[in-house]
Image (cartoon, rainbow, N blue to C red):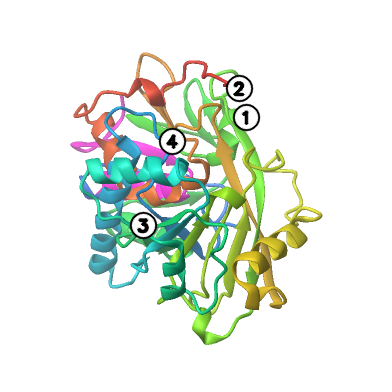
Amino acid sequence: MVRTGDHPSVIVVGAGVFGASVAAVLAERGWAVQILEMSAPGHERSSSHDASRLLRMSHGDEDLPDLWYTRSALNSRELWLEIGADEGCDLFVPCGALWLARSANGFESRSEKDLAALQIPAERLDPAEAQRFFPDVFYGDLDFLLYEPLAGVLRARACVSTLISRAKRYGAVLRTGRVVPDPAGSQLDGEILMADRVVWACGPWLSALFPGLVELRSVKQSVFYFGVEPQWSTPPLPAWLDDGADSYGLGDLDGSGFKAVHAPPDGGPEIDPDGVERFHEPGSLDRTRKILGHRFPPLATADLVTARVCQYELTPDQHFIVAPTDNTQTDWVVGGGSGHGFKHGPALGNYVADLLEGRERPRPAFGLSRRCHE
C-alpha cells in the first residue's frame, strides 16, 4: 500500500464522465488523486464527447428491486445543478423530456409506475397535447404522451471539462499517456505507478485491458444535427424520445442544430475503438430523415449541419460494471454505461468513492460474473 502523507491515494484511469466524476469526488474527500488519460478529457474517440446528453429519470425496463437507476438519475440531477452552481456554469438545461408513446403498455407506462413509486413528477397527456411543446408535430400514431418536467439536457463536453477542473482544484493531477495493468502497479508508457487503489474507467477499452474478465461490446450510433429556425430551439423545446421508432433528440441547443438519433435495439454496429473510422453508417442519414420528417413534418428537408458518431459500451445485461477485479479490492473497473450512462456521472462517482472507503458494499448486479445473454 502506498500513501501520500496521511491521505489514501488513487489512480483513476480514464477521464470521461465516469472517471472524471470519481476523481472529483475522491479529490474533494481528501484523496491523493492521479488521473491518467490517453488523450484530452472528452476526446473524439471517447464515449463522453459531443455537445449534449439527455438526463431523464425514466428507466422503463429497470429490473433492480430498489429502482437504483431511477434514484441515481434524480440524485445526479441535483448534483449536476450543485456542481454547476459551485463552478459558475450552466451544465444542466432543465427543459423537460417528452416521451411519445405508441403503445399503452410499453416502456413509457412501465416508467410511469416507477416514477410514481418514487414520487417523481410525471404527467400523462393526450397525444394532441404534443402541439403545446413543438411548433409542428404529427401525433396521429401515438397512444399517449409522458412528460417528465424534471428531465432535461446536459452540456456533455462542458460537464467533463468542469469535473476535471474541479478535481484539479482539489489537488488531482492529470497525466497523459497509454496505461495498462501491471502486476507491480499501473504502467503509464513504461513507467510503473502505484497507489492504494486503481479505478479503471476506460470505456470501450476495458474489455481489451481485462480480457476474459470484463465482458462488453462497443457499438456506434450515428448522430445528426440539422439546421432549423429559432422556434425549434431547446429551450424551450423539451428533449423528445420516440421509443417505438427507436429514436430521440432535442431542439437546437447553443446553436448546434436540431439533434436526431436513430438508436436500433441491438445498439448498432460493433466497433473497435482504436480502429474504426468515425463516419456515420450508410443509410443512417436517410433513416433519420424519414423519422424526423414523420414526427416533425417541417424538418423533413432541413439541411444537415453536422454528423457525428456516438459510441456505446454494452454489457450483455446492460447493467453497469462497478466491481473489484479480485479479492484484494485494489483495482476496480467502472463502465458499461450504455447510452444512458452519462447522466449518472456524479451519483456514480459518490457510489464508487463510498465503495473504496468501505461505506458501501458491491452490488451483485454490477459484478464481473458472466452475465446473461437473454
* Left or right placement of residue 84 versus residue 15 in this view: left
**Mark 1 or 4 closer to N-term?**
4
User: Dot 4 corresponds to which residue?
Assistant: 61
Q: Nearer the viewer, mark 4 or mark 2?
A: 4
Name the amino acid, label 1: Ala
Which mark, residue 208? Answer: 1
Q: Quadrant of the N terminus?
A: top left
Magenta extent: 1-27
How many other residues sit within 10 Å of disc 2, few (<14), some (14-19) or many (≥20)? few
Q: Are marks 4 and 2 in contact (CB under 8 Å)?
A: no
Q: Which residue is mark 3?
A: 163
Residue type at the position of mark 3: Leu
Residue picked out by circle 2: 211
Q: Mark 2 is on which residue type?
A: Pro
Mark 3: which secondary structure?
Answer: helix
Of labels 4 and 2, earlier in sequence is 4
**Residue in front for this viewpoint, 134 or 226:** 134
- The answer to whether the residue labelled 3 contacts the one labelled 4, judged by CB atoms less than 8 Å apart, is no
Q: Disc 1 vs disc 4: which is toward the camera?
A: 4
